[in-house]
Image (cartoon, rainbow, N blue to C red):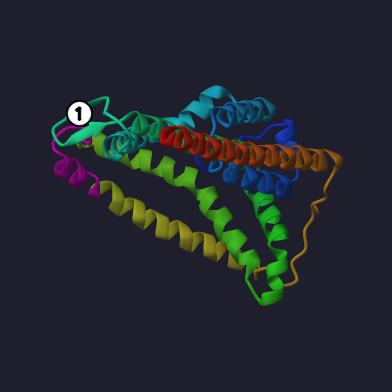
Amino acid sequence: MISDITLGQFFPGSSILHRLDPRTKLLLSLLYIIGVFLLNTPMAFILYTLITLSLILASRISMRVILKGIKPIVIVLIFTMIINILLTSGEGEPLFSFLIFAVYKEGIIRAFFMAYRVIMLIVGSSVLLTYTTSPIALTDGLESLLSPLKLIKVPVHLFAMMMTIALRFIPTLIEETETIMNAQKSRGANFTEGSIIKRARALIPILVPLFVSSFKRAEELAVAMECRCYRGDVGRTKMNKLKYRLRDILWLTVGALLFAGLILLSVKSAELSALGEAMRILFYKI
C-alpha cells in the first residue's frame, strides 16, 4: 500500500502538458479546483469527467499510475461515504432504516458526489501539476505568479522553496517508510493483525526511526545549501527564464471558456430549481 502512493512524484515526458509553462498549469489547476466545487448538475459532472479524461490523455500518463494514486484513499472515501449516507436526512420516507439510522436517497446522492469531487481533485491536480511538472519548474512558476506580493515584503521565494522541498521529499519518505516496515517485518513485527490499539503500537518502531531519519536528512540538506552559498532570492539569477508561448495562451483561453461555461451551467441550474420550486408551491396552493 505504501508503494502505491504517487503523490508528489514527477514522471518525465514530452507530452503537451509537460511542455506547458508551469505558470499556465498552476492557473489551470486553480480553475480546475474551483470548478470541482461548482458542480451541481449531471451535465456538469459529465463535462468534468470528459475534461479530466482529456487531461489524462494529453499527459500520456499511464492509467495504472492514475489508479495507483487513488488506491490509498479508497478506505477513507468509503468511510466518508458511509458517514454521509447515515447522517444525511432527506424529504419523504427513508429507503430503509436500522437501529437509529435512516438512509435517504439524498444521502446516497450526496455521498456519491462527495467521492466524485475528491477523486477529481486528486486526479486533476496530480495530472496538471505534480505528475507533469518538475519541482524546480514548479518553484519558478509559483514564485513568478506570487512575485507581486514582494511589494508588501512577503518572502515569496522562501514560501515557494519550502513547498517544493516538501513535495520533493514525499516520495523519498514513502520509500524510506517502506524500507523500515520491511526491516521490522523481517524481525517478526506484524502490522495487519490484532486490535486497532495493538496495530497502532506496532507503528511506533516505524515512526521513531522515520522521524530521526527525516531530521537528519533536513540537516544534511541545510548544510548542502549553505555550502553552495544559498542565500534565498537575493542576487539570484535563473538559467532558464519562463516565457509564455502560443500554446500556453491557447490552453488558458480554453480553460477560461470551460470555467465560464461551468459557471453558466450552475447559474442556470439554480434558476431552474428556484422556478420549479415556485411552480410547485403555486400549484400546491391552488
Horizontal relation, residue 128 to residue 251: left or right = left
Residue in the image at 34% along x and 34% along y: 81
Measured as percent of width and height from the top left, residue 241 is found at 81, 54
Horizontal relation, residue 252 to residue 269: left or right = right
- When the figure is inspected, residue 168 is found, relative to residue 158, above or below; the finding is above
Horizontal relation, residue 152 to residue 91: left or right = right
- When the figure is inspected, residue 188 is found, relative to residue 158, above or below; the finding is above
The quarter of the rendered structure image containing the N terminus is top left
Horizontal relation, residue 207 to residue 138: left or right = left
Q: Is residue 195 visible?
A: yes
Residue in the image at 82% along x and 48% along y: 244
- Give the residue type that dot 1 points to: Ser
What is the total number of numbered labels drawn onto the structure image?
Answer: 1
The quarter of the rendered structure image containing the C terminus is top left
In the image, the segment drawn in magenta is: 190-204
Residue 76 sits inside the magenta stretch: no
Measured as percent of width and height from the top left, residue 94 is found at 26, 29
Q: Is residue 122 visible?
A: no
Residue 192 sits inside the magenta stretch: yes
CA neighbours of label 1 inside 10 A, class few (<14), some (14 to 19), many (20+): few
- Residue annotated with mark 1: 97
Tell me the element at label 1: strand
Residue 103 falls in image quadrant: top left
Instruction: Spot the residue most to the front.
Output: 286
Measured as percent of width and height from the top left, residue 59 is found at 66, 30
Residue 266 falls in image quadrant: top right
Measured as percent of width and height from the top left, residue 67 is found at 48, 26
- Who is closer to the viewer here, 214 or 21? 21
